[in-house]
Image (tube, rainbow, N blue to C red):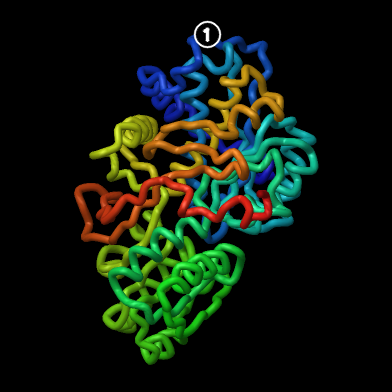
Amino acid sequence: MPDRTDRRIGRRGWLRGAAALAAGAPFASAPFATLRAEEPPIRVGFPVPVTGPYATEAADQVRAAQLAIAEFNESGGMGGRRAELLVRDDKLDPGEAATRAIELIEKDRVDFIVGSLSASVQLAVNTVTKQRGILYNSISQSDQIVSSPDWGPTSFHEAMTPHMTATAVGRYAFGKFGKRIAYVAADYAYGHEMVAGFRAVGAGIGAEELAEIKMPIGTRDFSPLMPRLEALRPDILFLCNFGRDQQVFVKQAQESGLKRMTHIVAPILLQTARIAGGAQAFEGVLGGTSYYWGIERDVASAKAFNDRFRKAYDGRLPSDYGALGYSGVRSVLSAAVKAGSTATEKVASALAGMKYDFYKGPQYYRACDHQSVQSVFIIESKANGRVPEDVFNVLETVPGQEDLLKTCAQEGLG
């Protein structure tokens, strides 16, 4: 069955990548040791939607997570103990994700779980891991996973939260474009939480909300919305959807002429959607992101990460959500090395409050809710560059700071 089979890099490509990575020593804290085959591997479960509307983003998460595993092993592992990644298809469905998580814990005996690419799916996985005392590091945006009652001592969140993202992007957009706003949002937790974040920013400046339009995941035709949105003439249209839905909406907004009447701002402006949609459709679209490979010009850890990814994947560059797969896995393995153990309590203790810079500049896990505090990049789509991934200009870097987050008291954890 495909959902129970490890999805691994082809053997030839894997060997090329591993050889290239050997020169790196990215897990500098782990002394080199001969990897002993008799040692049981550290098993990292990785449920992501490798099929469905977010499959492109999930595929890059897998590539980057495999890179973190390869680096860990090439650097000596944990006292010679290897790690391995067990990828499962959660099909973007909470029930399926819960089933796969239970299977990973009870059948495959994983030490940790990292993954997810949907707010509702990650909450389903988190429920399972909390009940069974397994550490889970989520790599998809959610406010709920760091709030009561969903949060637990084993819950960690490497991705940004919608509140963090919307605060950074909203402050920029309102300051540039005006206060009359409309929303088109995916009708599930991601869309709802992004809208809530923008509303919180807008309330402080007297923004005027003209409409909120909710659409189901997988919508292929947004054209019926265009006349209504054109008639509203908002200063800003916040596009709170993801993946293929984002690509389709922007293309149809270009075709209808809507883009000439408003500024389209996506809280998460996806590299994969921009590449698929093309420069003309996305011209002038702004948004936020947790990572863009182009920051390598200024951030040493980004350059190192990109170079290792290029070597492993024939010159390809990592995407935003791919990078989260890398850091989510690497964080957990680094904490295990620091703890000298895979025991959940010891690794959680090492991870809580951990400071690190793996790929984008300084980050740390806030001790009270295990949220990764990190920079947010404000980006704008540009004409095609020298490589297919050269698609954004970075307009502003918002430093990682806790005033972008809800307080832990607001999250019910204070």
Question: Is 349 on the left or on the right of 33, as rendered?
Answer: right
Q: Is residue 145 left or right of residue 11?
A: right
Q: Is residue 5 visible?
A: no
The residue sitting at 71% across, 44% down in the picture is: 152
Q: Residue at x 63, y 32 (%)?
A: 44
* Vertical relation: 196 (above or below) 335: below
Q: Which residue is depicted at the point 52% across and 20% down?
A: 73
Q: Position of residue 299 (x, y in %)?
A: 30, 37
What SS does tag 1 mark? loop
Percent x, y of residue 76: 51, 14
* Residue 108 or residue 355, whichever sits in front: 355
Rendering coords of residue 313 (x, y %)? 38, 35
- Give the residue at x 37% y 47%: 399
State how many labels appear. Answer: 1
The 10 Å Cα crowd at callout 1, few under 14, some 14 to 19, many 20 or more, is: some
Q: Quadrant of residue 296?
A: top left
Where is the N terminus found, in terms of image quarters? top right
Examine the rendering and report whether any part of residue 299 can be seen. Answer: yes
Query: Circle 1 is placed at which residue position?
Result: 33
- Residue 4: quadrant of the picture: top right
Q: Nearer the viewer, residue 351 or 275?
A: 351
Horizontal side of 401 relative to 33 (left or right) equals left
Vertical placement of residue 292 versus 24, above or below: below
Percent from the top left, x then y, of residue 21? 39, 23
Give the residue type that dot 1 points to: Ala
The answer to whether 22 is drawn above or below residue 312 in the figure is above
